[in-house]
Amino acid sequence: MPSIRVLLCLIFIFLVHGSFDWLYNRPQDAGTDVPSGKLMSLSFAPFREGFSPLEEKFPLAEHIDEDLRLLADKTESIRTYSSLGGQQPTPDLARKHGLKMIQGAWLGYGYKDNTSEVNALIKSANENPDVVKRVIVGNEVLLRGDMDVDRLIGYIREVRKAVKQPVSYADVWSMYMKYPKLINEVDFITIHILPYWEDEPISVENASQHLEKIVKQVEDEARGIAPGKPILIGESGWPSAGRQRGMAIPGVVNEAKFIRGMIQIANRHGFDYNIVEAFNQPWKSELEGVVGANWGLFSADREPVFPLTGPVEETPNWQNRFAVATLIWLLAIVKYSKKLEQVSLIRMLAFFTLAQVFSVCLVTLADFLWYTSYSTWQRLYAVALVIANTALGTLLLQRSSDILIDKPGNMQLANGLRSGYLLFILLALYKTYGLAINGRYLSFPVEQFAIPAFGVIGLIACLLLKEHKLNSRSLAFDSLIGWSLQGRCNRFIAYLLSFAAIALILGESKAFMDGRDFIQAHPGLSEGLPVALTYTLYNQQLLSWLACLLALSLPFWTKSHLKQDI
């Protein structure tokens, strides 16, 4: 009969897990399908994995050729950001594939580099007038603070004198409002409208309306300076992965919703637009983290991130994840089922559930970290985290089974658990203070700490089933690991984790309050702080991370009353 109980528990948990995954990963409505035909323009940077302008590893001509062949039936035009750095063949290859270009020159601190870029842009525009239809001198130079506006205007005037194509400068929309004299210097106004990156982030549901509002605002500003001057939405898009900002949540479905909604608005009002971007850019993870690398309509492997028509799946490979998680879970059950055959049904169910939670967390961690790793060091870190989580999960299952069969604690197992938790706590503190100090591009590492956090909750639940009551003794770390190791720094660990949580909330709120547009909209601490806190506490990823910190700190607040191993 015990084997029948094991089988029933397995079937029950398998069905619950399968049903949850199926419901959670159902294809979702992502808005109105994009009308048939090509998109107006896509930002094009042909950097594949292993290539980076930061390391001066520039794209090969064959890569550009392959990419433009893929884009030829997707878009009428491409926007480039540099005229050098391996991209010199782009106009000829664009002609080959029937594409037009908005060609750019990359400007920065260096006078010599700027001169080379401007000369290359002028040369390309004059030699390829049938392909290069517009040119852009500089991209977000003022936003980055690389040069002042007068020096920038000098470069714009130099190019306007030398080419016949319309000339512009591209930056976030607020820079044209801050420096309205730019409007007279360009033939068309190129503005970036990125609701995710606004000082007050916009939800994907309100992003299309925000787009309309900003274009109207810039039109009104330009009307008084240069009536009728054309406006190009030079960049607009949404990230498919990365950290949440206030109401702005990255995701595959949300990216599809934004792109479809943007195209509907653009077609309705006749907006001229360029979508950022064609391909995910692995190299950007060095500067902008996971979120910076994932704005493409295509992945770094040149696979579509989402369809422009029909329902969209957030996790298309969920069946594979479910299968692997189930296999890991069954291996754990095979190891422990005989040991647990004589325990009550509720204890058996508790252990099997904990094992399933661990397997799901491990597979989710491995899949996400590998997908968002773009370099050797990032992949080594991913492998190390998977190994560390596997090791800790194994120790936690061993301790959980010992509790449920009323086996006394084991000093060697307790030492392993303590060492594992101290390692993860040190890493959690490092990551949390990093998020608090300068977390703009850092992701919340919830997946990396899910097993340690659920491990604490699982051990507490096992002790509760054993002792039939919850008290401070059940919450103490020594009780959870089964041996008194006389850790004198327990309360200090709890304080550090708590201070880290508070620092994260304050740091995230301060980041909003430092924004130029935020300050203008909410001057003064009394007006700005409540709004910033609202954005901060709406962040589901941040709240999940705070929950992890709370779970990790909980056992260290309670003074141990353990007199002997349990």
Image (cartoon, grey):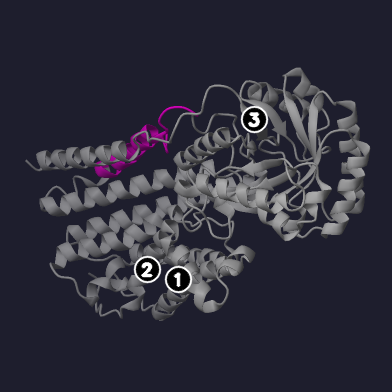
Q: Residue at x 29, y 46 (%)?
A: 356
Q: Is residue 280 left or right of residue 57?
A: left
Secondary structure of residue under mark 1: helix
**Quick one: label 3, few (<14), some, or many (20+) residues within 10 Å?**
some
The amino acid type found where label 2 is placed reads Leu
Where residue 482 sits in the image (x, y, percent)?
28, 68
Looking at the image, how many numbered discs can be counted on the residues?
Answer: 3
- Residue 550, numbered label: 2
Element at label 2? helix
Quadrant into which the C terminus falls: bottom left
Residue 487: name its quadrant. Answer: bottom left
Residue 359: image x %, image y %? 34, 45
Residue 324 painted magenta? yes
Residue underneath mark 3: 40
Whole-percent x and y of residue 431?
A: 53, 63
Instruction: Please tell me which residue lies in front, 1 or 319.
Output: 319
Residue with the most extreme left position? 1
Which quadrant of the view contains residue 189?
top right
- Seen at 78% across and 21% down, the residue is 95
